[in-house]
Image (cartoon, rainbow, N blue to C red):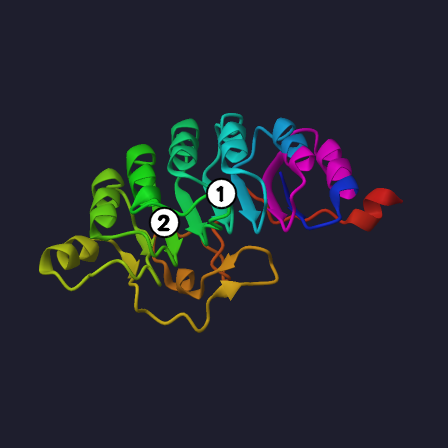
């Protein structure tokens, strides 16, 4: 079981590592790249992936949705500063029926502006098994979209809504519904300690006290029932 982080200008080494993994790669992070060929290369050879992160990428949403069809075992997905639409998110959810944790942050808007509640409705329509949902800075989501998520994702145990400024959580009904979720971060909660960090995925220190299930490490990274703590040593591979 292996974990791989690919940054810009590492495509040759990444392909070598993927080949050496013999289809056993379960955790893959691709960041700061527009290399669609590399993206497809990894996906086509890694159908056991359980955790996939795409950060600051120019890979189009329809390509991510197509890739999701090849990842039936995916449990955790992170898409940050990527180009996505409602249909892309919906198709991902319908393809990845084992998806339990979603981090969707910083829609790039390069293709077109987000429509009102577009992402929220797509999540509600297609991801009923979610336990953890991390949305950050989604200014297009309103109470209507949030209600749809609460209806469509009944097993949520963690919900992060920080900087989702279109939401008003002052109403008692919505407060009561949110209160049933074990760990909720509201739009006005502090964000001083939140950023895209050097580990190439969204750092959310509030995951540290996430009470259930007990499979988050000290940095807030989701750990499933498999081991992906091993990182390849590129220099050793080239010897």
The residue that disc 1 covers is 111
Q: Residues within 10 Å of mark 2 (few under 14, many from 20)?
A: many
**At 36% from the left edge and 49% from the top edge, which residue is drawn?**
133
List the single residue furthest toward the left: 172
Looking at the picture, tell me which residue is in the foreground, 22 or 7.
7
Task: Pick the quarter of the image with the N terminus.
Answer: top right
Q: Residues within 10 Å of mark 1 (few under 14, many from 20)?
A: few
Q: Position of residue 207 (x, y in %)?
A: 41, 60
The residues colored magenta run 13-39
**At 83% from the left edge and 47% from the top edge, which residue is drawn?**
236
Looking at the picture, tell me which residue is in the foreground, 32 or 152.
32
User: Can I make out residue 197 in this image?
Assistant: yes
The residue that disc 2 covers is 133
In the displayed structure image, the side of residue 175 where residue 67 appears, left or right: right
Q: Position of residue 98 (x, y in %)?
A: 41, 33
Looking at the picture, tell me which residue is in the foreground, 33 or 115.
115
Q: Position of residue 83 (x, y in %)?
A: 50, 44
Task: Pick the quarter of the image with the C terminus.
Answer: top right
**At 30% from the left edge and 69% from the top edge, which residue is drawn?**
188
């Amino acid at each position: 079981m292996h974990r791989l982080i690919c940054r810009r200008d590492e495509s040759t080494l990444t392909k070598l590592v993927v080949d050496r993994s013999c289809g056993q790669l379960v955790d893959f992070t691709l960041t700061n790249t527009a290399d669609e060929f590399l993206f497809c290369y990894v996906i086509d050879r890694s159908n056991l992936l359980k955790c996939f992160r795409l950060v600051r990428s120019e890979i189009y949403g329809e390509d991510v949705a197509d890739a999701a069809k090849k990842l039936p075992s995916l449990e955790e997905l992170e898409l940050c500063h990527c180009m996505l639409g409602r249909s892309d998110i919906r198709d991902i959810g319908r393809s990845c029926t084992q998806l339990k944790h979603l981090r969707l942050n910083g829609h790039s808007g390069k293709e077109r502006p987000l429509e009102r509640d577009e992402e929220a409705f797509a999540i509600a329509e297609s991801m009923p098994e979610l336990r953890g949902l991390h949305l950050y800075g989604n200014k297009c989501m309103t109470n209507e979209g949030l209600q749809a998520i609460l209806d469509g994702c009944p097993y949520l145990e963690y919900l992060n809504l920080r900087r989702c400024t279109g939401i008003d959580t002052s109403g008692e009904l919505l407060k009561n519904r949110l209160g049933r979720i074990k760990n909720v971060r509201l739009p006005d909660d502090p964000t001083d300690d939140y950023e895209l960090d050097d580990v190439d995925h969204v750092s959310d220190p509030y995951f540290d006290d996430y009470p259930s299930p007990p499979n988050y490490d000290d940095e807030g990274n989701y750990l499933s029932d498999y081991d992906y703590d091993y990182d390849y040593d590129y220099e050793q591979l080239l010897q």
